[in-house]
Image (cartoon, rainbow, N blue to C red):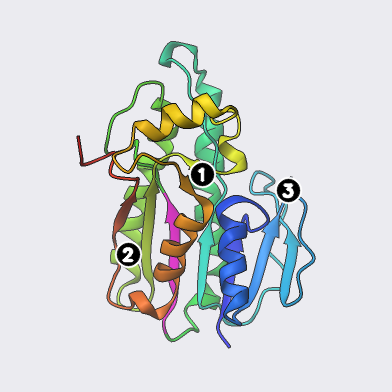
Amino acid sequence: MKQYLIVGGSSGIGAALVKQLNARGYGITATYNESEKNDTVGIKYIHYDVQDPNTQLTNLPEVLDGVVYCPGRIHLKPFHRISTSDFAEDYEVQVLGAIDVIQQVLPRLKKSNDPSIVLFSTVAVQTGFTFHSAVSASKGAIEGLTRALAAEFAPKIRVNAIAPSITQTSLTDRLLSTEDKIEANAKRHPLNKIGTAGDVANLAYFLLTDKSSWMTGQVIKLDGGISTLK
């Protein structure tokens, strides 16, 4: 049975992916921090704080077939109102956290026959949006990391990233807090709707499993068409 680690697997996209993997009978270890874990049969939950340098991932399977790093932050402010500490905290959570996790689990991934790493960027990196300087800076680093690791780890470990547009999760609650906000954001997209956690989890599942065995080094836009259609 294949074993997967989902960092940030107790809410949002991570929780949706955990549900999908569990339904298909895979072994799952999921981390939680601020969100409460869900006591689901077949899933092992461990507490892990990506911002605490003293915490380590423990009690992992000897062999990991894939890891998905889900933690993220959204600071949407005019550039002159964002502090350097905001930029640093975004980088710490979204980039350094991913690096630390990958370094910790790399020996276990190398023992798999077809290991995969899935990271998350944002559509805002390659399509400039106002007030997105902080998230674009850190997620831009994720895109660079994805391609660099894909090159370094080939042909053994595949590394890909997903770049979604705004998605209905707890991370975007304040941005989609009313029906008017949801409608306004939906209309920005050619498909005239907001993405769901399940939409993104579907693609993460594809990248994580051997269904994508000939794909690495890719940053895939999943954004309702907003980045390419007018």
Displayed quadrant of residue 119: bottom left
Q: Is residue 115 magenta?
A: yes
Earlier in the chain: of badge 3 and badge 1, it is 3
Q: Which mark is residue 150?
A: 2
Above or below: residue 130 compared with residue 166: above
Question: Which of label 3 and label 1 is nearer to you?
Answer: 3
* Mark 2 or 3: the one toward you: 3
Q: Is residue 193 above or below residue 159?
A: above
Could you tell me how far apart the alpha carbons at marks 3 and 1 are, in whole angstroms? 17 Å
**Secondary element type, mark 2:** helix
SS at circle 1 = helix
Q: Earlier in the sequence, mark 1 or mark 2?
A: 1
User: Is the stretch drawn in magenta largely helix, strand or loop?
Assistant: strand
Which residue is located at x 41 percent, y 35 percent?
Answer: 186
Residue 175 on image: x %, y %: 54, 28
Viewer-closest of 57 and 114: 114
Name the residue nearer the viewer: 187 or 124. Answer: 187
Disc 3 secondary structure class: loop
The residue singled out by tag 3 in the image is 35
Q: Amino acid at mark 2?
A: Ala
Region of the chain picked out in magenta, as a range: 114-120
Residue 94's label in the rendered image is: 1
Which badge, 2 or 3, comes first in the chain's sequence? 3
Label 2 to label 3, Cα distance in Å?
A: 31 Å
Q: At x 43% / y 15%, what residue is drawn?
A: 78
| Residue type, label 1 | Gln
**Marks 1/2: CA–CA distance:** 18 Å
Q: Is residue 57 left or right of residue 37?
A: left
